[in-house]
């Protein structure tokens, strides 16, 4: 098994709000992949005394532990329990009803000799590669369906956050786990997994430097850091976002690759 993880902050000196891990249970059969992209609040306002990096670390740790230790639970139930555990850790000190309470996108994958399970919530991406080289993206595109003019307004976007008809992230409400994109694939049909936050998927989705199969092939050949370096290279040629309109010049970027 080949495992490679790389995460790079969008702005030097600013905390990286992404979080990732790959865990292989004792005995070496199967494994778990977790990737989170923390949602940056406007001007640091989120009703929480801890902040987004604290939240993603807590949630990520719970996801990794429960995914490994509770294989009787579906990934949706693992996510719900992890959200509840994390919320309980700061319920008494923070305003969890705030629309910008710390939250994150989620990619979860879990595999054994029989199957590969997956879960995606919000705009991080999971790629599944089959033995014949076919690459299937697992996407939750509900945020993309929000009109650009709405997304340019923080108030309008917050009105759709974790709301019916809008989009969903892992925050303080365990019920959003039922909104995630989930599925199972026979293990014999999966050769590799590639999970990325949207700071890395810009290479495909925003900059159009290649497709999903090109993205996975690049990581396999040159490594996870190469993908992020290429994203940063394009960003540096368009620092003001005139050619490629985006909310941040550079975003936290995480790439996690597992070759089964």
Image: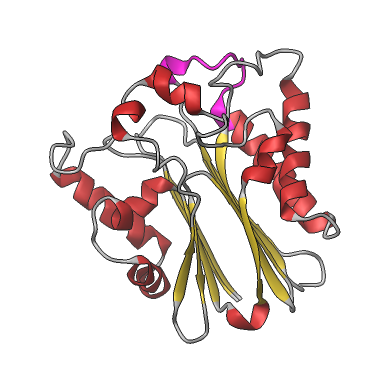
Quadrant of the image occupied by residue 68: bottom right
- Farthest residue to the front: give it: 165
User: Residue at (64%, 83%) from the top-left corner?
Assistant: 188
**Residue 56 placement (x, y as % from top left):** 60, 36
Could you say which is closer to the camera, residue 260 or residue 81? 81
Q: Is residue 87 left or right of residue 217?
A: right
**Residue 92 placement (x, y as % from top left):** 76, 14
Total labels drawn: 0
Q: Please say if 210 is above or below 91.
A: below
User: Residue at (74%, 18%) from the top-left corner?
Assistant: 91
User: Residue at (46%, 31%) from the top-left corner?
Assistant: 15
Residue 223 lies in the magenta-colored region: no
Q: Is residue 229 visible?
A: no
Q: In which quarter of the image is the N terminus?
A: bottom right
Q: Give the range drawn in magenta.
A: 42-53
Q: In this view, does 228 lie to the left or right of 196?
A: left
**Residue 145 placement (x, y as % from top left):** 40, 42
- Farthest residue to the bottom: give it: 132
User: Residue at (82%, 72%) from the top-left corner?
Assistant: 27
Could you say which is closer to the camera, residue 160 or residue 254? 160
């Amino acid at each position: 098994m080949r495992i490679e993880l790389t995460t790079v902050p969008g702005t030097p000196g600013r905390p990286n709000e992404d979080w990732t891990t790959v865990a292989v249970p004792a005995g070496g059969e199967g494994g778990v992949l977790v990737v989170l992209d923390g949602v940056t609040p406007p001007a640091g306002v989120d009703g929480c005394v801890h902040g987004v990096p604290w939240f993603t670390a807590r949630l990520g740790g719970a996801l990794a532990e429960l995914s490994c230790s509770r294989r009787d639970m579906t990934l949706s139930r693992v996510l719900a329990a992890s959200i509840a555990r994390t919320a309980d850790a700061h319920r008494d000190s923070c305003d969890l009803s705030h629309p910008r309470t710390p939250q994150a996108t989620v990619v979860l994958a879990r595999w054994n000799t029989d199957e590969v399970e997956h879960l995606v919530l919000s705009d991080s991406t999971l790629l599944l590669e089959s033995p014949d080289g076919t690459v299937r993206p697992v996407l939750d595109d509900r945020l993309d369906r929000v009109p650009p003019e709405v997304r340019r307004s923080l108030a309008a976007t917050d009105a759709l956050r974790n709301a019916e008809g809008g989009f969903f992230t892992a925050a303080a409400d365990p019920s959003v786990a039922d909104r995630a994109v989930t599925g199972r694939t026979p293990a014999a049909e999966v050769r590799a997994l590639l999970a990325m936050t949207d700071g890395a998927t810009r290479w495909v989705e925003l900059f159009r430097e290649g497709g999903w199969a090109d993205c996975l092939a690049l990581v396999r050949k040159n490594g996870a850091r190469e993908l992020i370096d290429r994203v940063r290279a394009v960003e540096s040629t368009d620092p003001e976002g005139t050619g490629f309109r985006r909310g941040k010049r550079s975003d936290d970027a995480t790439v996690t690759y597992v070759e089964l």
